[in-house]
Image (spheres, rainbow, N blue to C red):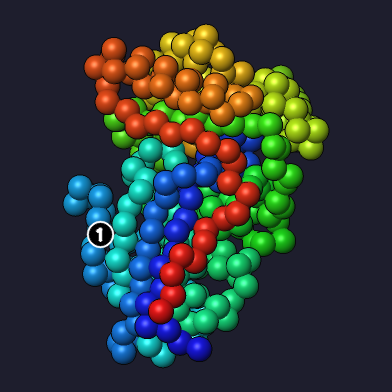
Amino acid sequence: MVNSRAEAYAPATVANIGAGFDILGLAVDGAGDVITVELRDEPGAVILSIANDEGKLPRAADKNVASIAAAACLKQIGARQGVGIHLKKGLPSASGLGSSAASAVAAAVAVNALFGEPLRREELLPASLEGEAAVSGYHADNVAPCLLGGITLTNGTSIERIRRLPVPQSVFLALVTPDVAVPTSEARAALPAQVSLKQMVQQTGAVAELMDAIYRDDVVALAAAMERDGVVEPARAHLMPYLHEVRFAAKRAGALGLVISGAGPTLCAVCADEATAARVANTMQEFYAAAGLHSLIRHGKIRTQGAAVTAVS
Ligand code: HSE
């Protein structure tokens, strides 16, 4: 059945989770991107409106991640009609919260809902990835948790290479996004081309510990393993204002560990309960304010469910 309008929400995501560079990611409860698609007789996807982006995102259909993902999804469905897209940004761009992945995923989920959900959730991965690729490369460490929810291990871009991991119930996250843009391309350019054998052993050890902690629902071990990234954080630290000072302040407020979220500048602290996560988020914001930097904060649990259809008519 073809509907006339459909709306979908897609959550923020934390890629890497510290040591798991390019292979781990998780979805976060709370604000995300919302896309409404309207059925049109003309084939393909066009952008009709974008809210909350301060005019920064491209409106051209072949440049915007949402319209690219929507067009790919329409093609996959074999639709003769097209869609007009309204995008409401809930996530700041270039912030390390998987903003482009959220727009791409919400677009694919909304288009699928418009046409009566002919595709299974997993089948929306290629269209979502095509949208994400327009901005930050063809990788799935944000797209997979955004689409599927929970924590995902992405050892490739095909659905067979993506595993959903158990979601520890004892983990609460506090996130702070200072008002500085760190484009993923710049954060990737800062990385070393090679690592030593010693670094490789430390990094694989950290990821193995992280996996073990996830399966045992051990928040203390999880936070420690996340922080044992000896390759990516040291190379990117200079791009994240006050990283070490904010980590210190967060831990004094009760956080168990803190890592860069994705390519930054958002920082993600791990806490053992909600009250602590709320306190840590406020503490981090106060730290940045004292340093003259505006920031956005959020706290919450790992979101078990991925993107969701919020209305169809
Ligand atoms: N894993 C990526 C990075 C983040 O840290 O560069 C977004 O995919």
In the rendered image, the quadrant that contains the C terminus is bottom left
The image quarter in which residue 95 lies: top left
Label 1 C-beta lies within 8 Å of the nearest ligand 1 atom: no
| Observer able to see residue 33 | yes
Side of 46 relative to 228 (left or right): left
Q: Amino acid at mark 1?
A: Ile
Return the x and y of residue 165 as percentages of the image width and height: 72, 46
42 to the left or right of 221: left
Instruction: Give me the residue at 37% from left, 83% from top.
Output: 4
- Which residue is painted at 37% across and 63% down in the image? 35
- Residue 255 pos. (x, y %): 56, 18
The residue at 70%/51% (across/down) is 164
The reply to whether residue 260 is in sight is no
Residue 224 lies in quadrant: top right
Could you tell me how many numbered marks the image carries?
A: 1
Residue 34 spot, x, y in % from top left: 38, 58
Rendered view: 90 above or below 82: above
Q: Secondary structure at mark 1?
A: strand
98 sits left or right of 213 in the view: left
Residue that carries the numbered disc 1 in the rendered image: 50
Residue placed furthest toward the front = 275
Q: Could you tell whether 222 is left or right of 172 in the image? A: right
Question: Quick one: 288 or 79, which is closer to the camera?
Answer: 288
- Place of residue 99 in the rendered image (x, y in percent of width and height, measured from the top left): 40, 48
Classed neighbour count for the residue bearing mark 1: other residues with Cα under 10 Å, few (<14), some (14–19), many (≥20): some
Near-viewer residue (90 or 225) = 90
Residue visible at 32% across and 28% down in the picture: 295
Residues 184 and 193: in front is 184
- Quadrant housing residue 33: bottom left
